[in-house]
Amino acid sequence: MRVAFIQTSPVFGDIASNVERAVKRIARLDAELIVLPELFSTGYQFRSRKELLELAEEVPGGYAVRQLAAAAKSRGACIVAGLAEREGRRAYNSAVLVGPRGHVGTYRKAHLFWDEKKIFTKGDTPFAIYKAGKARVGMMVCFDWVFPEAARTLALMGADIICHPSNLVLPYCPQAMITRSIENRVFTITANRVGVEERLEGKSLRFIGSSQITSPAGEVLARAGGRKEEAGVIEINPFEARRKRITPVNDLFGDRRKDLFKL
């Protein structure tokens, strides 16, 4: 199975151009599963909830989701992308999965980062697993990586691949996602963005890029640089993620000491 990330540099508020550029990149990829960054269609640094609501879209009927669904149908692929979702007067930092038949599922970011807490509503969707081609996939968004319970929950539910749309500014995540792969024996696809946003005084954000695909053994199968838009495509066997035995007598999930965990 061929999987990919697309690393973008969106122009804040220019939804039509941002979506068009992403769709053109999708059209050039030979992949069955493609992951785009967090908030790929709008950009990241909103000045207010009012501005966020003006730029957010309903799911699944909004512009970006419809364009991604058309691209998925044309390519016979599944696409995961992060976007601003509007539901009434609430706005969520969401990830959507679309396939050749249209919208498949939505995940709303559970762990909001920094100023996101001022304008986004905390995610209320449970973690879930979806079929995407040959693989079982789960979604989490950016700062969710800090909380190992997020990846573990998806792994326990049967995820082969964790799709991770991101707008990373902290430098630790690419290495931490290697650990998330090892401790859960799953593939991860982190799609980040590059560029700078300086829309709030004194809060310049530089996005680190370094989008990557990691294996259940913690191998970095593909990694982007930190400055330019690019894509990474790799062929994987998603069924490798279903082998949870570490030694002949150690099973990753079977050996968990739930009697000692205080969660």
Image (cartoon, rainbow, N blue to C red):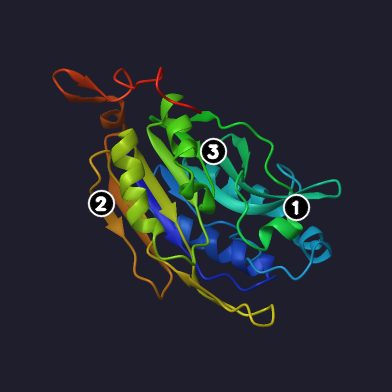
Residue on which the image places disc 3: 99
Which residue lies under the disc numbered 1?
Answer: 57
Q: What is the crowding at mark 3: few (fewer than 14 residues within 10 Å), some, or many (at least 20)?
A: many
For the image, the number of numbered tags is 3
Q: Is residue 2 visible?
A: no
Mark 2 or 3: in front is 2
Of callouts 2 and 1, the N-terminal one: 1
Q: What residue does disc 2 label?
A: 221
Percent position of residue 35, x then y: 47, 50
Along the polypeptide, which appears first: circle 1 or circle 3? 1
Q: Tell me where residue 174 appears, x and y as whole percent.
A: 36, 57
Q: Amino acid at mark 3?
A: Gly
Q: Is residue 56 left or right of residue 160?
A: right
> SS at mark 3?
strand
Asked if residue 171 is positioned above or below residue 252 in the image, the reply reads below
Q: Name, please, the residue furthest toward the left.
A: 248
Q: Is residue 243 left or right of residue 130?
A: left
Q: Amino acid at mark 2?
A: Leu
Task: Give the amino acid at mark 1.
Answer: Glu
Is residue 234 left or right of 92 when viewed as pictured? left
The residue that appears at 36% across and 52% down in the rendered structure is 176
Q: Residues within 10 Å of mark 2 (few under 14, many from 20)?
A: some
Whole-number angstrom distance, CA of label 2 to CA of label 3: 24 Å
Q: Tell which circle, 2 or 3, labels the residue nearer the N-terminal end.
A: 3
**Residue at the location (67% across, 42% down)?**
123
- Dot 1 falls on a residue whose secondary structure is loop
